[in-house]
Image (cartoon, rainbow, N blue to C red):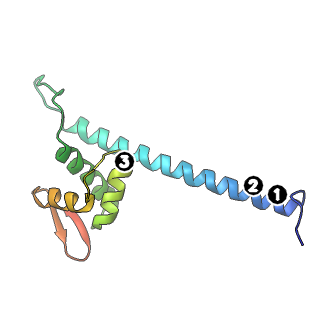
Amino acid sequence: MVIPMTDPLSRAMADLATKEQDISRLQNEAEKLRVFIEMYRSYAETSIPNGSDNSVPRSKKDLIADASIVVIKRHGAPVPLSVLCTEIETSGVEIGTSDPKQYLSTTLNRDSRFRSIRGEGWVLTD
């Protein structure tokens, strides 16, 4: 038996599903804004004094490392590579390459600000 959509329960269930989709979409947008704000603040804190030229383009590796710092600080615990990769790209920083996880791992391995805890994820060095 098919219940017509004029049934109050069916309408309420459909409205709830729509609202839950809206909430999920808004939460994703809010998370992107949080990442942007954290990255912006980290750039503002590390601005170059004495009027040096801040217009020098940052390298891809620098942008990835900065985004990694933001994600790791936000988690406050070791962050698995797959989570780190996803959150960096969600923030708008494109890792690119045919194997983004490998590129990210190599980039972090070569940067003394990061260390990997086997089986747990990436953390910042003290």
Q: Is residue 80 above or below residue 43?
A: below
Relative to 7, residue 53 above or below = above
Element class at badge 3: loop
Would residue 101 be seen by someone viewing this image from the given angle? yes
Q: Nearer the viewer, residue 8 or 42?
A: 8
> Which residue is depicted at the point 36% across and 58% down?
86
Residues at circles 3 and 2 in contact by the CB criterion of under 8 Å: no
User: Dot 3, how many residues are within 10 Å of its Cα: few (below 14), some (14-19), or many (20+)?
Assistant: some
- For the residue pair 58 and 100, the one nearer the viewer reads as 100
Q: Earlier in the sequence, mark 3 or mark 1?
A: 1
Q: Earlier in the sequence, mark 3 or mark 2?
A: 2
Quadrant in the picture for the C terminus = bottom left
Residue 77 is at least partly visible in this image: no
Q: Which residue is mark 2?
A: 15
Left or right of 33, for residue 105: left
Q: Which residue is mark 1?
A: 11
* Residue 64 picture location, percent across and down: 23, 49
Per the model, the C-alpha gap separating discs 2 and 1 is 6 Å
What amino acid does circle 3 point to?
Ser
Side (left or right) of 59 relative to 28: left
Q: Looking at the image, which residue is at 24% across and 38% down?
A: 43
| Residue type, label 2 | Asp
Q: With respect to residue 30, does 48 lie above or below?
A: above
Marks 3,1: beta carbons within 8 A: no
Query: Which residue in the structure is indicated by mark 3?
Result: 91
